[in-house]
Amino acid sequence: LALYVAAMDHSFDPKGCEGNDCNVPVKAQSQVSARAASDLALMAQATKLPQAFSWALHACSLKANDPVLYPASCGNVSAQHWADAAPNNAWPWLRLATEAQGRNDPSGVESAMHRAALASDWQHPGDEARRMLVSHLPPSVASTTVLYALTGVGFLHADKAGLGALYQYCGANQDANRAQTCARLAAGLLKSSNDLVQLSVAIKVGARTGLPQDLLAAAESQRVAAQANMKSTVELLRDPRRQCPFNQVQARISIRAADIGELAAIQEEFRARPR
């Protein structure tokens, strides 16, 4: 986990600039994150652990467009390695589908989506990363520090970009085979949804594939309530003096989300407030 967090390119404090060159701390952080990405890739190759492959893939992807800092060891880890290590988890297959979409490989997309639909495990590695980080935070840590730390680990959820490939794959025009695959994908998404983004995609794809209306109605009710609650929190930002309360709310939700998921954490936060 320490390597993964170090691999994230965080923002920096302008007061840390050396002289007038504010690129110095950025360059230093980039070098640190590149070394951490390299170490993660080596760890994944050595351990063959699904979690390690997932973290390494994301850390390496942040350096993919930097020919100077891109670690050579990153070339030895792939989404296929992750899928081989966790064949019953849907997320590596969705990542493979996204990659196939990017290279305009319809058969690759079809194959990866079929495997994702057969997966019995929809647990995302980012959830475990968040739990691990929260378990190591001091009880008295400031809310801004909590948000900063969880934002770093939260970048792992960029791997949920596979949702975009799924949404496109399960578009309006589906033949019988694809409709069956998409129905399974929607059911898996809906059952495992613990954040607003995934729940929203699950509802839309589920409506296209004919999931039971009672399930979709209950999910939509949950989505609308969570979205309304979060909107009321964002309203705090209209007043600069309310930044601190906003951070406190976000930190509480983020910490609880590590244990019970974002949706349940939002519900718990607002249920505890006086009417």
Image (cartoon, rainbow, N blue to C red):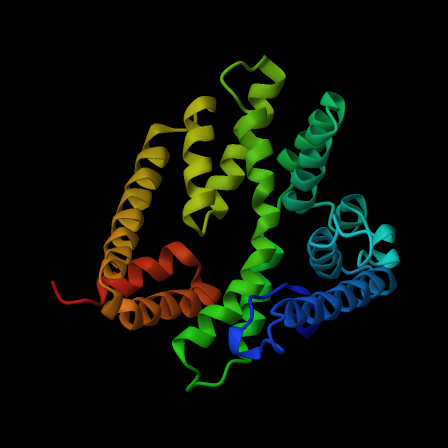
58 or 123, nearer to the observer? 58
What is the quadrant of the N terminus in the image?
bottom right
212 or 27, nearer to the observer? 27
Q: Residue at x 63, y 70 (%)?
A: 21
The residue most toward the front is 20
Q: Is residue 9 left or right of residue 130?
A: right
Q: Residue at x 45, y 69 (%)?
A: 147
Q: Is residue 8 left or right of residue 39?
A: left
Q: Is residue 253 left or right of residue 180?
A: left
Residue 269 point in image, percent of width and height: 29, 65
Residue 165 point in image, percent of width and height: 60, 32
Count of marks placed on residues: 0
- When asked about the image quadrant of residue 68, the answer is bottom right
What is the quadrant of the C terminus in the image?
bottom left
Q: Is residue 49 left or right of residue 76?
A: left
Residue 238 point in image, percent of width and height: 23, 58
110 relative to 89, above or below: above
Residue 83 point in image, percent of width and height: 75, 46
Q: Report if residue 115 is visible in the image.
A: no
31 or 88, nearer to the observer? 31
Q: Report if residue 208 is visible in the image.
A: yes
93 relative to 42, above or below: above
The residue most toward the left is 275
Q: Residue at x 38, y 54 (%)?
A: 263
Q: Residue at x 85, y 64 (%)?
A: 42
